[in-house]
């Protein structure tokens, strides 16, 4: 399966018609503990074991980045990566990190809702990405990447 498919499999736990997407119901349903800690140079860590799953996110991140990091780390737990934990920092296993980013983008910015809002804000071309980023509670850069990857112009 593609990373997007793993994210879509979690839609059953959330309302994908209303942004921002709430991650807590997914974490609760999948018995994943979420903690915050003070890291230097690390956005997040995912621990995945047969009986225990944990995401630790850097408490110093801006709220939008923190949400994306939580979704990204959730991707490491949900997708069949090798190993018991994942530490995310630049340069580490680029293929796995790109997959977790695609997972997070689909989860936080579901394609059907992005397309719907893209149409709704068609008259606001200058600020459309910024407005949508605010609605989805993600960074403008994450929203722009999502828009580009969905082929929206």
Image (cartoon, rainbow, N blue to C red):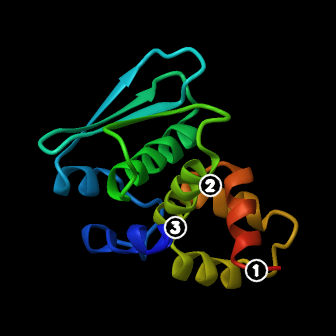
Residue that mark 3 sits on: 106
SS assignment at label 3: helix
Write the residue at 55% across / 58% down.
99
Q: In this view, does 122 lie to the left or right of 28?
A: right
Residue that mark 1 sits on: 151
SS assignment at label 1: loop
Comes first in the chain, label 3 or label 2: 3
In the picture, the disc for residue 134 is 2
Decide: few, some or many residues near mark 1? Use Cα within 10 Å; few <14, some 14-19, many ≥20: few
Q: Position of residue 29 (x, y in %)?
A: 17, 57
Q: Which of 96 and 129 is in front in this view?
A: 96
Q: In this view, does 100 lie to the left or right of 81?
A: right
Q: Where is residue 114 in the image (x, y as percent from the top left)?
A: 60, 75
Comes first in the chain, label 3 or label 1: 3
Comes first in the chain, label 1 or label 2: 2
Q: Which picture quadrant has residue 21?
A: bottom left
Real-space CA distance between mark 1 and mark 2, rounded to the nearest whole angstrom: 20 Å
Q: Position of residue 80 (x, y in %)?
A: 36, 58
Decide: few, some or many residues near mark 2? Use Cα within 10 Å; few <14, some 14-19, many ≥20: some
Real-space CA distance between mark 3 and mark 1, rounded to the nearest whole angstrom: 14 Å
Look at the picture and state if 69 lies above or below 39: below
Q: Is residue 62 left or right of residue 152?
A: left
Write the residue at 72% across / 71% down.
149
Look at the picture and state if 148 lies above or below 68: below
Mark 1 vs mark 2, foreground winner is 1
Real-space CA distance between mark 3 and mark 2, rounded to the nearest whole angstrom: 16 Å
Q: Which residue lies furthest to the front in this view?
A: 82
Q: Residue furthest right?
A: 126
Look at the picture and state if 34 lies above or below 25: above
């Amino acid at each position: 399966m593609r990373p997007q498919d793993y994210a879509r499999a979690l839609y059953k736990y959330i309302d994908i018609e209303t942004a921002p997407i709430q991650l807590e119901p997914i974490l609760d349903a999948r018995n994943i503990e979420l903690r915050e800690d003070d890291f230097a140079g690390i956005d997040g860590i995912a621990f995945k074991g047969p009986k225990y799953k944990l995401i630790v996110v850097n408490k110093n991140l801006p709220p939008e980045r923190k949400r994306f990091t939580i979704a990204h780390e959730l991707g490491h737990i949900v997708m069949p990566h090798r190993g018991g934990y994942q530490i995310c920092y630049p340069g580490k296993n680029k293929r796995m990190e790109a997959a977790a980013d695609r997972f997070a983008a689909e989860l936080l910015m579901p394609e059907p809702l992005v397309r719907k809002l893209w149409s709704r804000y068609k008259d606001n071309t200058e600020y459309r990405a910024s407005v949508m980023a605010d609605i989805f509670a993600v960074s403008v850069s994450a929203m722009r990447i999502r828009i580009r990857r969905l082929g929206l112009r």
